[in-house]
Amino acid sequence: MSYTKYAAALVRANAGSFNKIRISPGRSRSTLASTKTQEEKDEQMDGCTVVEAVPVELISQTKNVAKTPLPKIHIDFDNTQEAYRSKGNIELLRSLLVFKLCTIDFLVEKNKELMDLSKKLLGQWMFEKMMKMTFYGQFVAGEDHNAIKPLIQKNQAFGVGAVLDYSVEEDLTQEEAEKKEMDSCVSEAEKESPDADHREKKYKAHRQFGDRRGGVISARTYFYADESKCDNQMETFINCIKASGGASADGFSAIKMTALGRPQFLLQFSEVLVKWRQFFNFLAAQQGKSDMMVLEQKLELEELKESLTTLGVGAKDDIENWFTGEKLGLSGAIDLLDWNSLINDTTKISNLLMVPNLETGHLEPLLNKFTAEEERQMKRMLQRVDVLAKHALENGVRLMVDAEQTYFQPAISRLTLEMQRKFNREKPIIFNTYQCYLKDAYDNVTMDVELSRREGWYFGAKLVRGAYMYQERDRAKEIGYEDPINPDYEATNRMYHRCLEYVMEEIDHSRKANVMVATHNEDTVKFTLAKMNEMGLSPTENKVYFGQLLGMCDQISFPLGQAGFPVYKYVPYGPVNEVIPYLSRRAQENRGFMKGSQRERSLLWKELKRRLLSGQIVYKPVY
């Protein structure tokens, strides 16, 4: 049965038509997978000590051919001479100054006010000079794509690539941010009848959390104004992609979905995905399979048909045709990925926003009314995403889709997955981001890897710990839903290593998975290196990448790059005045980072002393 016929049936049929299952459950995939996990493995490992980079042959593309034995590669992260070879003495002094300032609570807490005051006292020209000598010079590469080229070229000479990130943000007051968020996240139907729709609290806009910058120190935030602004932001991303393509042959560029359209769609779509995932769980529980791992939950087809018929979702003969028409259930069972495959994007977006009502057994619209303009806004968001992916492919740039808040993330992950299905057929172009502080991170990763395996495309992932923990916890507690975050930092570390190990095992299995280990945690980097040595995975295969922010953790990035590992710095750029919100967050992030560990400052001092004692009063990097 074609999807076009489904769409037509949705328009004219009553809400109980099972046709909708062909639309929404496919959108629910791994983002909302079960949080049940297997017993975790011991992830302890010994430290690495020696730097050794030996030319090696590429490992076979399949496991059927014997691997070439590879020498183990170890990195000494205490070797300051290697770590800071790319830095002059002035740069080392600047890093020490900036990191020291970041430990002073008053300066960090009042950094925005102090920057504003400095601008008034010094004037614009002197203020920019001062910023470029300190915070801006430490964390930002330059004002535009031409100004950043010298830094990118220097880093490349020392084995470190770039993920370009245009870091300009609006400087809004909290009141302005809240107003924009409420205007852009509430539909016309909700404005007319606030309590008429059966919406889940998590996926509704709440004014007290309307300023999404609250409690967030390491992620850009976009607020919707209108469609023309989204077009402008798309053009900015395109320019960033082109600049990345022009700067190197293997660059990355980062984008955010909330910059590309009205967030109302992401909220509503996410809620639909959650409810369809819950529907699958409900059906699995009916068959006594709720305690299984998510990919082990296989619904017996005949029982499934009986359940759907009993619920009044559709006639048994029709249900039979729906499944056999898609060549599903041939094994007599349906798993979540089979369920997810019942989707095709050739319908009205508003038809996706149907949800099952388990009390009535019918499908119901998430909203009572959906305007033509809202429909157009949703379509345009999808079109902008497609345009960016095409530009990335044309320019030889890999595109990383940043993760965002959990009430947006199901939709963001699903849209990213659709891009991967389309553009990752021959090589990894699109990378999804997985936040490992989430309880369901492992299920998310395993579901997506399995789908890529079945469909034969290249899986691309960036693993991060997460940027929204305090905000997510406060929102869950205040509004009244389950905290989506792991209970503590150690649990997040275990989750990160578990997800990473799973992806690396897939790399070892097929060579079609790729992962960016985006972390400042030295233990996690050592864990990754140990797994690569254990698997005989060569850095020259470019399957495992490492990523850190510009101006931070050079003692990790540069030794890795000089040993031949693909490592990248997130490289922010933009005019001084317009990246102040970004610099403000870097100061806050570094306060916690520097107070928690003196390691980076002690290494900087160690290298500076070594140079002075050896007579290198003036040191100029050679490359």
Image (tube, helix red, strand yellow):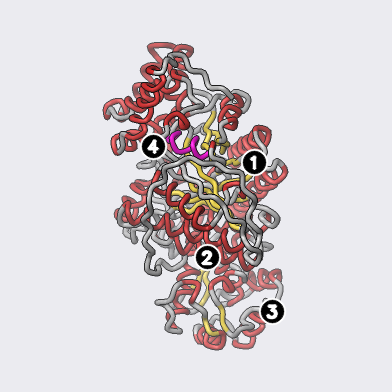
Q: Quick check: 222 above or below 450?
A: above
Give the residue pinned by disc 3.
325
Name the secondary structure under disc 2: helix
Foreground: disc 3 or disc 4: 3
Name the secondary structure under disc 1: loop
Between the residue at mark 2 and the residue at mark 4, the CA separation in whole angstroms equals 40 Å
First along the sequence among labels 2 and 3 = 3
Residue type at mark 3: give it. Gly
Task: Give left or right: position of 324 versus 269.
Answer: right
Residue 232 in percent (x, y) is at 61, 36
Q: Residues within 10 Å of mark 4 (few under 14, many from 20)?
A: few
In the picture, residue 536 is in which quadrant? bottom right
Give the residue pinned by disc 4.
175
Between the residue at mark 3 and the residue at mark 4, the CA separation in whole angstroms equals 52 Å
Image quarter hosting the N terminus? bottom right
Task: Give left or right: position of 585 versus 315.
Answer: left
Image quarter hosting the C terminus? top right
Do callouts 2 and 3 mark residues in contact (Cβ within 8 Å)?
no
Name the secondary structure under disc 4: helix
Which label sits on residue 447?
Answer: 2
Name the residue rendered at 46%, 52% in the picture.
530
First along the sequence among labels 1 and 3 = 1
Name the residue rendered at 51%, 41% in the picture.
52
Name the secondary structure under disc 3: helix
Q: Which residues are magenta?
A: 553-561
Residue 263 in percent (x, y) is at 51, 49
Between the residue at mark 1 and the residue at mark 2, the CA separation in whole angstroms equals 28 Å
Residue 564 in percent (x, y) is at 57, 41
Foreground: disc 1 or disc 2: 1
Give the residue pinned by disc 1.
250
**Residue in the foreground of this view, choosing between 51 and 340:** 51
